[in-house]
Amino acid sequence: MFEDVADRLREANQGKLPFEDQVEYLSDLRSSVLENKKMEQDLLFMYTYMAAITTQP
């Protein structure tokens, strides 16, 4: 059903869907933010681990 609508929109807009670039940008931004959140947790773990091993006699 929606394939026909997408095809008609692409034909009317020189092969691109409206806002296609913005949606792709937002998708990339979302992926980047999610990856950064994972990195923060890894860094917290590493700092805690390093602090623990340096305080041992």
Image (cartoon, grey):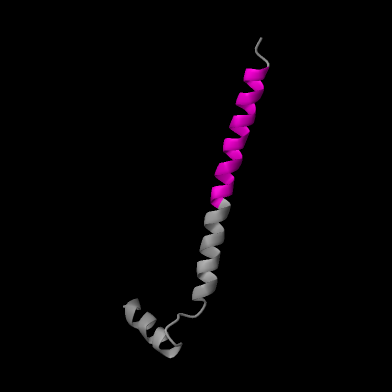
Q: Is residue 35 magenta?
A: yes
| Residue at screen point 68% across, 16% down | 55
Seen in the picture, residue 32 relative to 52 is either above or below; the reply is below
| Residue at screen point 63% across, 25% down | 50
Q: Position of residue 9 (x, y in %)?
A: 42, 85
Identify the residue at the far top of this view.
Answer: 57
Q: Where is residue 17 in the image (x, y as percent from the top left)?
A: 45, 80
Image side of residue 30 versus residue 13, left or right: right
Residue range of the region highlighted in magenta in the rendering: 34-54
Seen in the picture, residue 17 relative to 44 is either above or below; the reply is below
| Residue at screen point 43% across, 90% down | 12
Image side of residue 4 versus residue 39, left or right: left
> Which quarter of the rendered picture does the N terminus lie within?
bottom left
| Residue at screen point 51% across, 62% down | 27
Q: Position of residue 36 (x, y in %)?
A: 58, 48
Q: Where is residue 35 in the image (x, y as percent from the top left)?
A: 54, 49
Image side of residue 5 versus residue 30, left or right: left
**Based on the displayed image, in which of its 4 quarters is residue 48 positioned?**
top right
Q: Does the magenta stretch include residue 44?
A: yes
Seen in the picture, residue 36 relative to 7 is either above or below; the reply is above
> Which quarter of the rendered picture does the C terminus lie within?
top right
Image side of residue 12 versus residue 39, left or right: left
Seen in the picture, residue 24 relative to 39 is either above or below; the reply is below
Please state the total of marks drawn on the protein image.
Answer: 0
Q: Is the magenta stretch mostly helix, strand or loop?
A: helix
